[in-house]
């Protein structure tokens, strides 16, 4: 169950929370193909920001409680540090000489670390889940094929 918080508390509070770290590595697998080029990729993204609402867990979960309201919900402190890692396969396919289609399919792990500055004695393990990626895009080359 999730209870939503007021809009003001779910917004970005400082300029640091608008930044996002993203690293991506892509390696083509078969280089002798003409129009379809398969590749393997790895992506990692990290961000420190508030959620749009308060994340809550029922007391039956294995999360360590940080605060409990009168309804019996356990709330994790906001903001969070998010880390998403994805590995997968994809391909590019030429549509024309300048335009191409790019598709990526992957799986990964999403980690969510709660901000522990409010109560440093309450250390909890990160919340995690399996994630998936399905990405479709059209790209344009500004110069000849490389």
Image (spheres, rainbow, N blue to C red):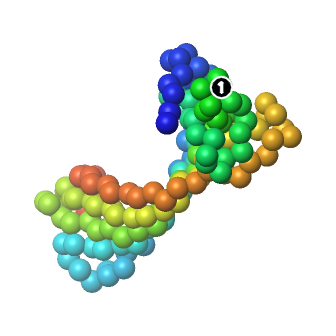
> In which image quadrant can residue 13 be found?
top right
SS for tag 1?
A: loop
Image x and y of residue 46, in percent: 58, 48
- Please give the name of the residue rendered at 58% of the width and 54% of the height, measured from the top-left corner: 128
Image x and y of residue 4, in percent: 50, 25
For disc 1, the marked residue is 69
48 or 110, which is in the foreground? 110
- Please give the name of the residue rendered at 63% of the width and 41% of the height, measured from the top-left corner: 59
Residue 22 visible (yes or no): yes
Image x and y of residue 33, in percent: 23, 80
- Please give the name of the residue rendered at 58% of the width and 40% of the height, measured from the top-left corner: 58
112 or 36, which is in the foreground? 112
Residue 16 visible (yes or no): no
* Left or right of 28 in this view: 56: right
Q: Quadrant of the C terminus?
A: bottom left
Query: Which residue, as the protein is rendered here, is positioned at the far right?
Result: 121
Q: Is residue 3 above or below residue 32?
A: above
Image x and y of residue 6, in percent: 53, 17
* Left or right of 113 in this view: 104: left
* Left or right of 122 in this view: 44: left
94 or 39, which is in the foreground? 39
């Amino acid at each position: 169950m999730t209870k939503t918080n007021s809009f003001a508390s779910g917004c970005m509070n400082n300029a640091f929370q608008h930044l996002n770290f993203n690293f991506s590595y892509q390696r083509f697998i078969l280089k002798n193909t003409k129009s379809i080029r398969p590749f393997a990729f790895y992506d990692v993204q990290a961000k420190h920001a508030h959620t749009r609402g308060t994340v809550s867990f029922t007391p039956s979960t294995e999360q360590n409680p940080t605060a409990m309201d009168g309804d019996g919900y356990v709330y994790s402190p906001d903001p969070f540090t998010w880390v998403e890692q994805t590995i997968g396969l994809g391909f590019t396919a030429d549509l024309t000489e300048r335009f191409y289609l790019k598709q990526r399919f992957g799986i990964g792990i999403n980690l969510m670390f709660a901000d522990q500055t409010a109560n440093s004695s309450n250390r909890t393990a990160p919340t995690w889940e399996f994630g998936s990626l399905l990405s479709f895009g059209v790209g344009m080359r500004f110069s000849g094929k490389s």
